[in-house]
Image (cartoon, grey):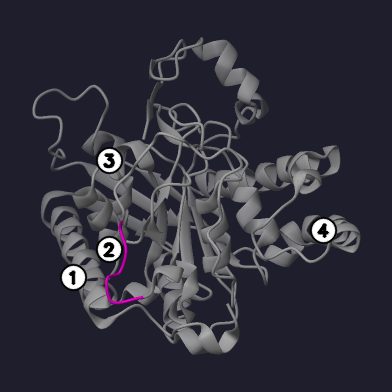
Amino acid sequence: MRPEEQPEAPSAPWRAASAFTMGAVGLLCKGFLTGLSRVETHGMEGFLKLLDEREKVAERERGLITVSNHISVMDDPILWGLLPLSYMFNPDNLRWGLGSYDLCFTNKGLSTFFSFGQVLPTHRTAYSQHGGLFQPTVTQAIRLLSRGPFPSANELPEKAATSLKSPDVIDPFSGGHLTFTTDGHDTFPAPSAYLSRRHSWVHIFPEGMIHQSEDRIMRYFKWGVSRLILESEPMPDIVPIFIEGFDDIMHETRTFPRFIPRPFKNVRVTFGEKLDAEQVFGDLRDRWKQIRAREEKKGGPLEVGVVNDTLKYSEEAVSLRKECTKRMRQAVLDVRRQRGYPEDDPKNSLASTWLREGGGDREGQKADGSITKDT
């Protein structure tokens, strides 16, 4: 897509529906937190200042990534009920999230609701052959964090399904070239196609599943977060967050009615300071750019968010993702330590630890007493 062809924003009806959806959900979450919960926040003033600096899209110079632990099925959206009312009806300055395809996008009604709510359809490898950190949705997230413009062609997974047919969700007032597909058959709006979405805010739970533990320890982080950090252009701002108490609101041992959040619980959210991202990740991004430049010299330019096999699977690329993910997890652990928790056991950062101590089951109570749940 040439710069002169990139539209400014989705259609007015789409923007209105998105603002209503984001605002209504935000109001419900805010009402629950302020009226039915006991809330304690730390560092929120600095985070709101950052959002204020990003209010005018045209003046943004980089995207924003927020990263937190994941302790309940309702972390998002209840977490964002902390925001003041004045922020809740401005989708251009609210988060984009990654939602499970097999939970949030199973029919056209749900797909439309979550699309209005700025949630990207994300396949989980345990439930879909289209999952993993190289799926088209991750490309969309990288481009939301970047400036653009971007090409209009759909990003197809390497192995497109031949029989799967999923509900299409498009903006009926926009052209079909403003869409992308996650499996070769479905159709979703491509948010990165619009100028108003450049340098957006993306929130991610790198643990990839709920983990409830009395000691508030975290599972290992998955590598998808490293792609957002290494490949977005320019380097995004990054804010680590540590949340507590949402597991009491929606504990996995809760009984009927399971779908209702439990009131009168203590909630604590700590916003870390914006990282000096260049200091923390700059060396890794420099090495990534060197690898990418070599590949482009051999095979031609690669669009933002697009990687070839070498950039996917080479030992050097994999080691960069591992180290980047490790540093991101440590940044969240640093915020956790501010709340008085002890140093993390290094083995908790290893996938092998959780496989060994938790057994082969992905969900349920583990040997250490913690509970995991796919979400």
Residue 292 x %, y %: 82, 58
Residue 293: horizontal and vertical position, in percent? 86, 62
Q: Give the CA distance from mark 3 to mark 4.
A: 36 Å
Mark 3 vs 4: CB contact within 8 A: no
Q: Residue 106 carries which label?
A: 3
**Label 2–label 1 contact, CB within 8 A:** yes
- Residue range highlighted in magenta: 169-174
Q: What residue is disc 2 on?
A: 116
Q: Which residue is drawn at 52% across and 67% down?
A: 144
Q: For the residues carrying marks 3 and 4, which lies nearer the camera in this image? A: 3
Task: Count residues near mark 1 (Cα–Cα under 10 Å), then give few for <14, some for 14-19, many for 20+.
Answer: some
Q: How far apart are marks 1 and 3 (CA)?
A: 22 Å
- The residue identified by callout 1 is 20
* Nearer-N-terminus badge (3/2): 3
In whole angstroms, how far apart are the C-alphas of marks 3 and 2? Answer: 15 Å
Q: Reply above or below: 175 against 159.
A: below
